[in-house]
Image: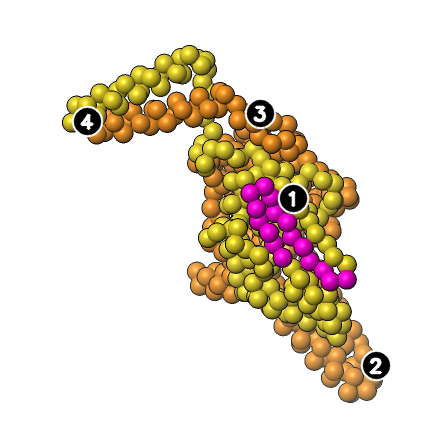
Amino acid sequence: MDVFSIHRPSPALFKYYVLSSFLLGPLFFVPLIYLYFRYHTMRYEFDEEGISMSWGILFRRQITLTYARIQDIHLTSNVLERWLGLARIQIQTASASASAEMTIEGVHEFEAVRDFLYSKMRGVRGSGGQAILPVPQEGLTAALQEVTAALREVREALEKKQ
Amino acid sequence: MSWRASVLRLLRVPHDPEPPPGSAPRLFRAAPNFFKLRLLRWAATRLFALTGLLFALYFVEYLDNKGTPRMVVVLMQLGEIFGWIAFAVEAFLGWCIVRLDYELRWYMVNDRAIRIREGILNIREKTIALANVQNIGIKQGPLQRALGIADVEVKTAGGGGSSSDSDGKKGGREPMHVAYFRGVDNAEEIRDLVREGVRMQKNAGLGDPDEVEESDVVAELLAEARALRVSARALS
């Protein structure tokens, strides 16, 4: 799953918008008009540095955030969304707003996106999913000596094999 | 248990959460007393509803004796029957949800992140890198103290949520920068574990890009060399 290829929400999101508007009863058309345009103008752009998301027709809105500033990632879903195979990825940065800074909606591969964002967010990047190792206590020289010893052993093992 | 499987299928509850990448996580669960506490709350609200229904029953009887038109009495009796059925269904479903909500809770901590998944109707999964944790606290109410459980609260930087809804229930919406290990009976242990994990991180958690440090490079090199040696030994 290539996260960079996500640009549009899935059509299931529109279904979700329609169903959730109808839950309001006779006033369903009020959110529906807004959500119709929101769905049709929603664009995602994942790049090397961050994500940007935009929507809106009269009042346009665009949010851009950098992966390195992501603080926490929430994955939430209600019953209706799960029936449609969706979930919301709510991304937090350290800003003071009470709601999520960015909510990625309408992506079926939400778990892949979450893992991707997780691997890019700060405090996690740069070690390919491996456990953080404690900094060698013995210091640089000892560590390099051990590396050399290990390499020598590998070389000897290879030579013996030949 | 079949009710369990069918409720889970109906509500499309996803599979168990994956642990966050990193070292093998330590998994914590809510304590059995957490279920007791939730059950107590469930029973209390149902009791309230039951009182209302019984009172309505009495009221219909009273109207009947007063000689109110037959039509009205029958309508009210129908309403009463409907109320009882709704009560029974709702009480059963509520019990299922309380039970499942207790069972389907995961609190995972590894060397670099916390992942918490909770909820049945509304499923919430939070992933917080330990590098971003700002403070940790323990909250305990009087009932929780009596049952020996507590909530561990982990906060990251940023605002959100007025103080009035900070315990997450009143507004129905939890503040976004807080995660809770609800109803655990080893709160101190979790707090110390998270604290230790946070101490191991080097940055302040305010979003400065990670700098690759020399010592990390050396540590990674060392680990790689060790792994190489192990596989060379296996080869020879």
| Residue drawn 56% across the image and 27% down it | B211
Q: Is residue B73 highlighted in magenta? A: no
| Badge 3: residue crowd in 10 Å (few <14, some 14–19, many ≥20) | few
Give the camera-side residue of B154 and A162.
Answer: A162
Give the labeled residue for mark 3. B202
- Where disc 2 sits, the SS reads loop
Question: Mark 3 falls within which chain?
Answer: B
Q: Can residue A15 be seen in this view?
A: yes
Figure colour of chain B:
orange
Relative image position of residue A25 (x, y in whole percent): 72, 73
Give the labeled residue for mark 4. B236
Q: Earlier in the sequence, mark 2 or mark 4?
A: 2
Q: Magenta part of the protein: which range?
A: A43-58
Give the labeled residue for mark 1. A65
Q: How many marks?
A: 4
| Residue drawn 52% across the image and 54% down it | A5
